Amino acid sequence: MASPCITISLLFLILLTVIISTTCNFTVDLIHRDSINSPLHNPQSTPRALLRAAVERSLSRSRYFSRATLQSNIHSNVIPNTFEYLMSFYIGTPAKNILAIVDTGSDLIWLQCKPCYSCYKQRLPLFDPALSTTYKSVSCESDSCSALPSHDCGSTSQCRYEYSYGDQSYVVGYLATESLGFDSGNSSRLEEVRKVLFGCTHESNGTFDAAGAGLVGLGGGQLSLVAQLGDAIGHKFSYCLPPIDNNSSNGRLKFGSQAVNTDPNAVSTSIITGTPDTFFFLNLESIRVGNETEAIAVKPAQVGSHGGNIIIDSGTTLTFIDDESLQSLISRLTNSVKMPQVSDPDGLFTLCFEDSDGVESAQSKLPDITFHFSGADVVLKPSNMFVKIDEKILCLGLLSSEGMDSEIGIFGNIAQQNFNIAYDLDAKTLTLAPADCTKV
Ligand SMILES: *[C@@H]1O[C@H](CO)[C@@H](O)[C@H](O)[C@H]1NC(C)=O
Ligand SMILES: *[C@@H]1O[C@H](CO)[C@@H](O)[C@H](O)[C@H]1NC(C)=O
Ligand SMILES: *[C@@H]1O[C@H](CO)[C@@H](O)[C@H](O)[C@H]1NC(C)=O
Ligand SMILES: *[C@@H]1O[C@H](CO)[C@@H](O)[C@H](O)[C@H]1NC(C)=O
Ligand SMILES: *[C@@H]1O[C@H](CO)[C@@H](O)[C@H](O)[C@H]1NC(C)=O
Ligand SMILES: *[C@@H]1O[C@H](CO)[C@@H](O)[C@H](O)[C@H]1NC(C)=O
């Protein structure tokens, strides 16, 4: 288990101030991969091309979730290159800055380490454990090692992992502990957490992206950052994601006492722990269009998924629901929306509307859509449910979960935009409140 937070003054050689606190309390920026703050930002890409790429990533993530919920022993802990957000943190002593993928769909924290054989090219230098005084390898007989889905004993009894992915990508490395540091919001101080378990990858091959030097798992399993910080963050984290079409604004990810929703309009639903325990399942009961009184009943959870029928995931752009509910929703919108329908030039979406006065005008003619989770009515604005194809066309950004191996829904990140979303993993509740995420 990781130790609590230590606030380190970066001038500590002079001032010798180190504050040890039992509670960690820090905030990091979530950088959307396409934003101007991301090394992946491509000014030549059109919004339509970016959206098309995001749909492809959403589909491959949906396939991953449906496979993973069927098999108890998933060997793929991450899905290469389907991420949406990056965050910066520090590792080692002396601390090295790392830009890593943030993934609510996996647990293990990992990065590429020296020496690295046939490793994918990354822009940042590789982390060198030999140069860090706080790096410690973990024995293959430890409990932490058995928490890895795929592990064995390396030549020196170190805990070795090997993950392979559907597309022949793989990573091989050793589990170790290190000190991690996070910006505290005060540029002269760093929040440091000692003895965090992470994977030091020494061999890899595949479709990973050069911008990221590693990955931070924020899932529900015991190796994730949130689980490792555990008591020190009161088992609480939250995030607020600005609209992805705002290419200059970062999201905020908070840990500890600030990761709560005090808004009187906040609503709460239960977080359901399913299989695997990495994923945060919710139960979506019904969907309502505008102020219609009759809601569309959503297909209940399948046997074995502990009552949850939808995974909340910040790393999937679109939202997936069962086909029957989707068709009912489409037909109700078709009947109630007074705008000309057009077909999606890329053939990805079923329901698109055109407004010659532009997308803002189109949004004003679309109803809110309420997702009724057990105990919580989440009112989604047209900007949460419709995606912009061009200056005049908006399409319903929902896809069918049918055709995947198991029909698990995904509550994606466009739907979550402009909500403050707080996870309390102790109370097992998720609290949502509308917010302007460009301002928090
Ligand atoms: C957490 O940080 C916030 C903002 O920096 C501060 O207002 C709050 O008092 C802190 N709480 C604890 C318990 O340290
Ligand atoms: C950011 O978005 C604005 C508004 O959509 C657009 O005009 C601008 O060109 C974008 N900037 C970059 C660098 O992509
Ligand atoms: C930032 O940290 C420094 C050094 O620990 C401290 O003196 C200063 O008061 C802090 N500033 C804020 C705004 O908390
Ligand atoms: C790495 O992957 C590429 C393409 O996916 C493949 O051609 C190559 O043989 C792989 N290298 C190793 C060492 O497996
Ligand atoms: C984007 O976010 C910034 C704050 O980060 C805000 O000032 C700006 O108004 C936003 N732009 C749009 C188009 O909403
Ligand atoms: C629903 O809302 C619309 C527009 O706000 C209003 O015209 C209509 O009467 C409402 N219908 C019901 C059943 O409340």
Image (tube, rainbow, N blue to C red):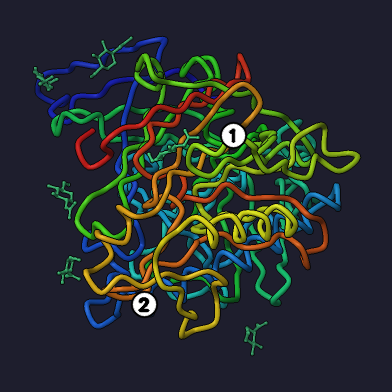
Secondary-structure class at tag 2: helix
Q: Is residue 76 above or below residue 313?
A: below
Identity of the residue drawn at 53% across and 44% down: 289
- Frontmost residue, 179 versus 344: 344
Going 56% across and 53% down the picture, which residue do you hit?
200
Q: Which residue is mark 2?
A: 48
Secondary structure at badge 1 equals loop
Circle 1 is placed at which residue position?
293
> Is the CB–ligand 6 distance for label 1 below 8 Å?
yes
Sequence-wise, which precedes: disc 2 or disc 1? 2
Rounded to the nearest whole Å, what is the CA distance between mark 2 and mark 1?
35 Å
Q: Position of residue 164 (x, y in %)?
A: 72, 66
Q: Which numbered disc covers residue 362?
A: none
Name the residue rendered at 40%, 26% in the picture.
255
Q: Which of pointers 2 and 1 indicates the residue nearer the eye?
A: 1
The quarter of the picture showing ligand 6: top left
Q: Nearer the viewer, residue 338 or 390?
A: 338
Where in the figure is residue 220, as x and y percent of width and height? 64, 34
The one nearer the camera, 40 or 292, is 292
Q: Amino acid at mark 2?
A: Arg
Instruction: Judge whether 389 appears above or below 413 on screen.
Output: below
User: To which quarter of the image does residue 41 belong?
Assistant: bottom left
Image quarter in which the C terminus is found: top left
* Tally of marks: 2
